[in-house]
Image (cartoon, rainbow, N blue to C red):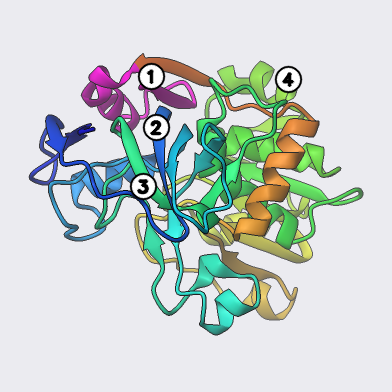
Amino acid sequence: MTIHALAQTAPRGHLEPIVLADPPPPEGHDVDVEIMSCSVCHSDVHLLDGDWGDVPRPLVPGHEIVGRVVRAGESAGLGIGAVVGIGWQSGSCGACAACLSGREHLCTGGKLRTCVGRQGGFASRVRCDARFCFALPEALDLGSAAPLLCAGLTVFSPLERLGASDGTRVGVVGIGGLGHLAVRFARALGAEVIAFDPDASKRALVLGLGASDLVDARGPLPKGAVDLLLVTTHASLAWDDWMRVLDLEGTLCLVGVPGAPLALSADPLMDEQKKVTGSVIGSPSTMRRMLDLAARDLIAPIVEHMPLERANEAVARVRRGAARMRIVLDVT
């Protein structure tokens, strides 16, 4: 069976239909997944636009995938027909210190990415290591689940790692595809949440998601208001101003990639023992905990649906920030 996909041959070029040869049957841990849906992440846009350097082309993007297993290797551990999700990472070396300590997302010996150097999810089928395919809990709405596989994990992982829980105050900067899920997961973990965004029309939305307030990100900013500040925007901010939003010993965590190097004073790091860190995706075990929490608390991304054939339109809307949180491309 051939694989039908949409691929790009040059940076910022349009996606065009392509037919890929059917690979030999999967072996070992590999599985073939018939794709039901794949959402458009801003990371896909960065790859398509060449923002992260040259990548192998033709490029078939897409790494927030929901589908069904149709073929499996002898060691896959997933049955035919299993409904699974696939995120940004599709494999690791399994032998480095990070992998051996359950931190496969920090692999230093051969981390594989779902749509870099291999075919991604803007296609009819994809092959992946079953150890990076995740059985989806029945309580999840499959139609909106795809963004959880990257956006959901990207915000849940640092919230969990940095201690968002009962009694902590979390600030979320930027209420978009990442930020709206960050608000929901922070609340589900028990934290009080303040949202920061320049768009006042999002007030009803963020309050409905569980935030206690929406503060204009253009200022004035409250001082000492949160213990953890999760920055989901790609904008380059006045970092000293945002460090003042943190209480003593608070942590600012980047999950959006800033457009310029960070510049901030040393005083808050020394006199107030504040910290700056970052986070990308999370380990397979963290993914499973995120999916379980999403199923338990019925945490679903806000999505709009488009057919895969309209992927160029979807990418253009994500590029200019016009998507309503997340666009899911329906494949089958």
Q: What stretch is highlighted in magenta?
A: 307-332
Q: Are marks 1 and 2 in contact (CB under 8 Å)?
A: yes
Q: Confirm whether residue 88 shows in the render.
A: yes
Q: How far is mark 1 from mark 2, CA to CA? A: 8 Å
Give the residue type at disc 3: Arg
Q: Give the quadrant of residue 38.
A: top left
Give the residue type at disc 4: Gly
Q: Which residue is at the front of the view, 227 or 76? A: 76
Instruction: Please tell me which of labels 4 and 1 falls first in the chain.
Output: 4
Q: Find disc 3 in the rendering and name its residue.
A: 127
Q: How far is mark 4 from mark 1, CA to CA? A: 32 Å
Q: What element carries label 1?
A: loop
Q: How far is mark 1 from mark 3, CA to CA? A: 17 Å
Q: Residue furthest front?
A: 74
Q: Find disc 4 in the rendering and name its residue.
A: 208
Q: Residue 332 carries which label?
A: 1
Q: In this view, does 331 lie above or below 170?
A: above
Q: Find disc 2 in the rendering and name its residue.
A: 34
Give the residue type at disc 2: Glu
Q: Mark 4 or mark 2, which is nearer to you?
A: 2
Give the residue type at disc 1: Thr
